[in-house]
Image (spheres, rainbow, N blue to C red):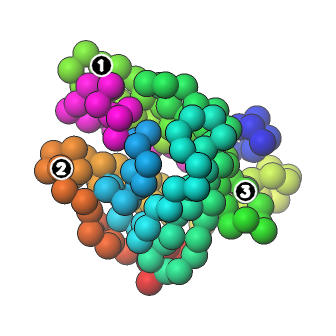
Amino acid sequence: MHENDYNWRVSYSLILPISSFKLWSIISSPKNLENFHPFCKKNKTLKWPGLGSSDEIHYHNGDIYKRTFVKWINNVGYDLIIGKETYNQSFVKWRIKDMDTKSKLTISIYPYIFNMNSKLFDFFPFFIIIKPSLNFYLKNIGKGLLFHVKTNKKVTKNQFGSHKWFSK
């Protein structure tokens, strides 16, 4: 799977008051999502680090999604496929841009649902249902990451609001 396999993506970028090296150390550590992902109950490591890494996100609603890392670029980011193991997978890119004493993180999700068939047929469901929900999801991850960077504390369950797909 590759980003070119999808019609649309949802992206979110944020500037963080840390070096790109420090940001990389946060997002590339095992179980990293437990520190800053407000919808993640547990982030179980299966294989780590590098290309071929895999882990599981145990969401607060009980769903478990497996992430398999298909590209790993030290200090730059990674690409992964994510989803329930027996279902279709979405493609996700995490990229870091160095900005001297700050860094910029961009997360792009290429969701499988309403995104792999006809652009005409999938247009309205994608832009009315999927995109707004994933924008909210990514913004909450960004808020969680900023909170973690500033306080060195873990986020709490639904700290910035609940999500209709991933919260209990």
* Amino acid type of the residue that numbered disc 2 sits on in the rendered structure: Asn
Q: Position of residue 59 (x, y in %)?
A: 49, 72
- Classify mark 3: helix, strand or loop: loop
Give the foreground label among 2 and 3.
Answer: 2
Question: Residue under circle 1?
Answer: 99
Q: Residue at x 22, y 44 (%)?
A: 149
Which residue reaches farthest bottom?
168
Sooner in the amino-acid sequence: mark 3 or mark 1: 3
Closer to the N terminus: mark 2 or mark 3? 3
Location of the C terminus (image quadrant): bottom left
| Residue 156 vs residue 72, the one in the foreground | 72
The picture places residue 21, in percent across and down from the top left corner, at: 32, 25
- Relative to residue 105, is residue 89 depicted above or below? below
Outermost residue toward the front? 47
Q: Residues within 10 Å of mark 2 (few under 14, many from 20)?
A: few
Query: Which residue is pictured at 77% across the width and 61% down the height?
Result: 88
Task: Say which amino acid is labelled 1.
Answer: Met
| Mark carried by residue 24 | none
In the drawing, does residue 161 fall left or right of residue 120?
Answer: left
Magenta-drawn stretch contains 155 = no
Q: How far apart are labels 2 and 3 at the CA level?
A: 32 Å
Labels 3 & 1 near each other (Cβ < 8 A): no
Q: Nearer the viewer, residue 56 or 142?
A: 56
Q: Quadrant of the N terminus?
A: top right
Marks 3 and 1, Cα distance to the nearest angstrom? Answer: 32 Å
Instruction: List the residue tagged with mark 2.
Output: 152
The magenta segment is 10-26
Is residue 54 in view?
yes
Question: Which residue is drawn at the image coordinates 65% and 49% (left, top)?
Answer: 68
Q: Position of residue 113 (x, y in %)?
A: 72, 61
Q: Residue 89 shows which numbered tag?
A: 3
